[in-house]
Amino acid sequence: MARRLTGMRPDDLAAAVGSSSAAVSRYELGQAIPDGAVLARLADALNMPAEFFADGRPQLRLDSSTVHFRSMQASDTVQRQQVLAQIELLWEVATAIEHVIEFPDIDLGLPLGVPHGGPAEAAHAMRKAWGTSAGPVAHVVRQLEARGTLVIELEAA
């Protein structure tokens, strides 16, 4: 996640820490654990505290095939992976916050986990479930948050 957050490619990270791409891949897959010196170099190269790499953090790994990007042509694979890593990190933060603050249950008026077509079809189904007409939805962010959705704005890479 740290590598994807920075937008680095595995080869670039390997070169930055004086390791092989295969070793970086094994670290990322959890097949190997870097020693203290390598971990320090990884943390430095990725501008993360070494604690970021400790065991025990809740982790989410999104499948990029289930995520919609407005313009696939305008973003390359590295940019898409960077955005997915930002969302995964946000999920970790929200999970930690949820131990202190109770978020509302998610209720968008649509069954979760069921494909609703593309964004336009999902928006149409939500409008129908919410009883809103065509045109702008008043206070859409407030309405989404009240229905249990965490709304964020990600900066483009």
Image: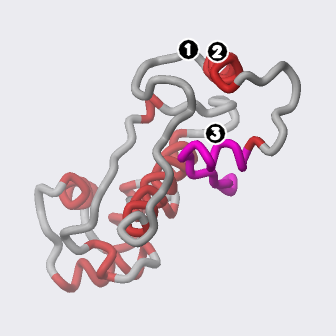
Of residues 69 and 145, the one drawn nearer to the viewer in this rendering: 145
Q: Residue at x 50, y 51 (%)?
A: 104
Q: Is residue 57 left or right of residue 89?
A: left
Q: Position of residue 126 (x, y in %)?
A: 64, 24
Q: Residues within 10 Å of mark 3 (few under 14, many from 20)?
A: some
Q: Secondary structure at mark 2?
A: helix
Placement of 107 over or under 91, stated as above or below: above
Asked whether 11 falls inside the magenta stretch, the response is no
Kindly identify which residue carries mark 1: 117
What amino acid type is highlighted by mark number 3? Ser
What amino acid type is highlighted by mark number 1? Gly
Q: Residue at x 72, y 47 (%)?
A: 141
Q: Position of residue 124 (x, y in %)?
A: 69, 17
Kindly identify which residue carries mark 3: 75
**Disc ID at residue 24:** none
Q: Position of residue 38 (x, y in %)?
A: 23, 78
Q: What main secondary structure does the magenta stretch of the protein show?
A: loop
Is label 3 in contact with label 2 (beta carbons under 8 Å)? no
Q: Residue at x 42, y 76 (%)?
A: 45
